[in-house]
Image (cartoon, helix red, strand yellow):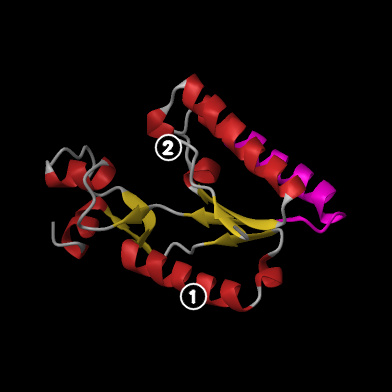
Amino acid sequence: PDVVIHCGAPSSSDYEDNEFKMATINLQKLIDIGKEKCFHLIYPQSAVLYNSPVVSQGYYEMKVRHNKMLNRESTKLKTLNSFNFTQIVLPRVYSEDRTKGLILRIKNNNIYNWNHKIKFTSKGDCMDFLSEFFERFEINKNLFDSATLVVPERYEMSIADIKQFFNI
């Protein structure tokens, strides 16, 4: 393939050392393949990594290690013109059809502070951003070489307002 989308890292709620090791090994395998065959790696990751005090230290360290690995290897492989990557940083994404996390807690009325404000984007807004990205990417992949794109947080509202916003 000439494009690979790597979504293989576990979420912070799936913390287990073996899963982190496997995600790192899988990313390294992709980079190694890039040494032999030219392709563009699209690497989505969570913005929660950068702005949340609740992310586990192990998860944080793994994601930082992955980012350093991508940057280091892509710099080496650029001289061979064989490896390009684009990171896409995703904020909290909510929709009424979510079945875990905050939305599940809202549905179960299991909220400690309904007035707590949260920045997020809706699933629809995130899908629009990604659709536009892939349309532009299809036209000219080189525009996104070694780029980091950030899906914008469209909303900031209280949990009570999120409940009303999604009609939960």
Q: Position of residue 57 (x, y in %)?
A: 53, 26
Q: Position of residue 130 (x, y in %)?
A: 46, 67
Question: Taken as a whole, is the magenta stretch helix, strand or loop?
Answer: helix
Residue in the foreground of this view, choosing between 35 and 56? 35
* Left or right placement of residue 22 versus residue 131 in this view: right
Q: Name the residue carrying label 2.
A: 11
Locate the N terminus and report the quarter of the image it occupies.
bottom right
Q: Which element carries disc 1, helix, strand or loop?
A: helix
- 13 to 122, vertically: above or below: above
Q: Quadrant of residue 41?
A: bottom right
- 138 to 83, vertically: above or below: below
- Magenta region: which residues? 63-85
Residue in the foreground of this view, choosing between 72 and 3? 3
Q: Quadrant of residue 66?
A: top right
Q: Which element carries disc 2, helix, strand or loop?
A: loop
Q: Quadrant of residue 111?
A: top left
* Left or right placement of residue 78 versus residue 138 in this view: right
Residue plotted at (33% across, 62% down):
123
Is residue 61 part of the magenta span, yes or no? no
Residue plotted at (44% across, 62% down):
153
Residue in the foreground of this view, choosing between 2 and 83? 2
Q: Name the residue carrying label 1.
A: 132
Residue in the foreground of this view, choosing between 9 and 97? 9
- Dot 1 surroundings within 10 Å: few (below 14), some, or many (20 or more)? few
Q: Amino acid at mark 2?
A: Ser
Q: CA distance from mark 1 to mark 2?
A: 25 Å
The residue lying furthest to the right in this view is 79
